[in-house]
Image: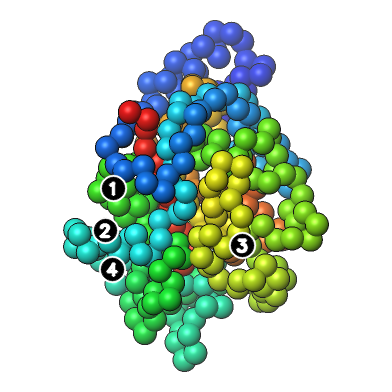
Amino acid sequence: MSAVPNPCCAPTKARAVAFQASCTRSAERLRVAAGSVENMVRLDGARFLMGGEDWDAIPADGEGPVRPVIVDPFYMDRYPVTNEGFGEFVAATGYKTEAEAFGWSFVFEGHLRSGRSGEQANEAFPEHPIGLRWWRKVDGATWDHPEGPDTSVAGREHYPVVHVSWHDAAAYAAWAGKRLPTEAEWEFASRGGLEHARFPWGDDLTPGGKHLCNIWQGTFPDYNSAEDGYAGASPVDAYPANGFGLFSITGNTWEWSADWFSPDYHLFGTRVNPVGPAEGTNRAMRGGSYLCHASYCNRYRVAARTKNTPDSATTNIGFRCVRDVA
């Protein structure tokens, strides 16, 4: 889409052609309303201002421009899917995650157990988008063995499930009679009713010195002071809910969205229940994680977004589900 003129200055005809082309390449809008709404919050939907133009945004992410978007009513999980919830899915279906099929997954090097090592991601997979030195390829790391085969989720039942790929998250959602949220639904929900604030609670990251989400404090990636109480993932209810009653919507673990990622598709796509392009190489993720820090990845702002290949799994990627109002 980079060859298409910017819509703010393109001639009307060119703009119309670009819009029509985007519509023909739009993903199909799915409607799913079979699942239980227990522990879900009904959001009535509305017109809201989506996107951001923050001075510290990462240009390649394509957060802007700020634009009015309309979403229909929907339900969203009050919490990210937990280890306990994902375990119920596995017990009922016998499902095997992609990390289990691959035999390994990525673990943050600072969370490796004593005596355990793993090949650096940028050495094992130099072409991989996660090719950063602080990720380790650990054999036997899975959703129920987060740091390797000698670890477990015992005592972490109410932590967000991790080491789940986009395909794994979509499989869980289908089993639950739900679906993954679009980026527009996720951002509408995360804002909690606030008009274009940086965070779900306002514009100040730590109002009154209080930490309201689980992100990195200190010097990344070498020292985490854990001033917010956690050096890794936290329970899904560790921090207050936003204005819509949604917990852990910022920080803690990334959340997969339904949409294929594009840095500029939204410039021409529909502004009513947008769903993104029909195909791509990366799925969009939202919310940031406990590894986010202002020095390199301040994507814990509600307008921020990033991407990953749909088969990727790490110790800081999870998800939550939505379903339509019947």
- State the residue position of label 2: 89
- State the residue position of label 1: 176
What's the residue at 40%, 69% (across, down)?
Answer: 157
Give residue 69's position: percent from left, percent from top: 56, 25
Q: Is residue 6 left or right of residue 87?
A: right
Give how far apart the Cα atoms at labels 4 and 3 are: 27 Å
- State the residue position of label 3: 214
Q: Quick check: 90 above or below 117?
A: above
Q: Are marks 2 and 1 in contact (CB under 8 Å)?
A: yes
Q: Amino acid at mark 2?
A: Phe
Image quadrant assignment for residue 34: top left
Color style of the picture = rainbow
- State the residue position of label 4: 100
- The disc, 4 or 2, on the residue closer to the chain's N-terminal end is 2
Q: Are marks 2 and 3 in contact (CB under 8 Å)?
A: no
Q: Amino acid at mark 1?
A: Ala
Q: Amino acid at mark 3?
A: Asn
Give residue 65's position: percent from left, percent from top: 65, 30
User: Which image quarter holds the C terminus?
Assistant: top left
Image quadrant assignment for residue 5: top right
Q: Secondary structure at mark 2?
A: helix
Q: Amino acid at mark 4?
A: Glu
Give how far apart the Cα atoms at labels 2 and 1 are: 8 Å
